[in-house]
Image (spheres, rainbow, N blue to C red):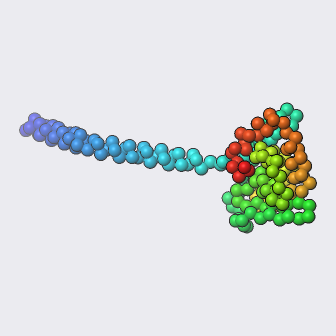
Amino acid sequence: MDNQELDEKTIEEESTQNKMREWLEDNMRIIVSILIVVLIAGGIYSYSKRTESPRMDESTVAVNEDDSTVKQEDVNEAIDSEEKETSSVATSQETENSFVETAVRGDSQTKLARRALADFLEKNPDSALTAEHKIYIEDYLRKNSGHTGRVSVGTSIEFSKDLIKDAISKSKNLNDNQLKNLHKYAVRVPSLS
């Protein structure tokens, strides 16, 4: 009787295994298809997260006038997440001697300098300035504005008109090698063209 029970259990187990094997063979295409879809979805999600990184216009360049080399500096000045946004629109104010730029979320000293230069050029057009000249000018303004520390929502930086004129003048004295070095940064900021 014990042998008969063992034989029945063995036959039952083999039958179950055969049924599972048949089911797996019948549904293999479906299982593989589901795995492929999950892998593709995971890849798309991973890629979309990677492309959300800061863009080049968040960084600045510096031209060393002595040896005409260009360095990329990270001025990714973070804005604390707890700070409340006071305005969603960038504000610019012109005084008799300067442009005062006020930061909104995502702004850096470079972006404020870029806006001050754009405001100045709107009133004093200069067709001789290329995108490369403008990259140099905004970096010069950033370094010489007198502002230290981080840029937060509501931070105002004053850029004197004399400083902007000085930066424009210095940019026109750049040699071909310096302008060539600046070109790789200028192409990454389409708004300067």
Q: Nearer the viewer, residue 22 or 9?
A: 22
User: Going by the picture, which residue comes out furthest to the top?
Assistant: 67
Residue 99 x %, y %:
85, 60
Q: Nearer the viewer, residue 9 or 45?
A: 45
Can residue 16 be seen at all in this image of the molecule?
Answer: no
Number of numbered discs visible in the structure rendering: 0
User: Going by the picture, which residue comes out furthest to the front?
Assistant: 127
Residue 149 x %, y %:
81, 52
Residue 129 x %, y %:
81, 48
Horizontal side of residue 120 vs 97, given as left or right: left
Please give the name of the residue rendered at 87% of the width and 52% of the height, measured from the top-left corner: 164
Horizontal side of residue 52 vs 130, given as left or right: left
Residue 137 x %, y %:
82, 48
Please give the name of the residue rendered at 66% of the width and 48% of the height, measured from the top-left corner: 55
Please give the name of the residue rendered at 10% of the width and 35% of the height, measured from the top-left corner: 3
Q: Is residue 66 above or below residue 167?
A: above
Please give the name of the residue rendered at 72% of the width and 49% of the height, measured from the top-left corner: 193
User: Where the N terminus falls, by quadrant?
Assistant: top left
Can residue 12 be seen at all in this image of the molecule?
Answer: yes
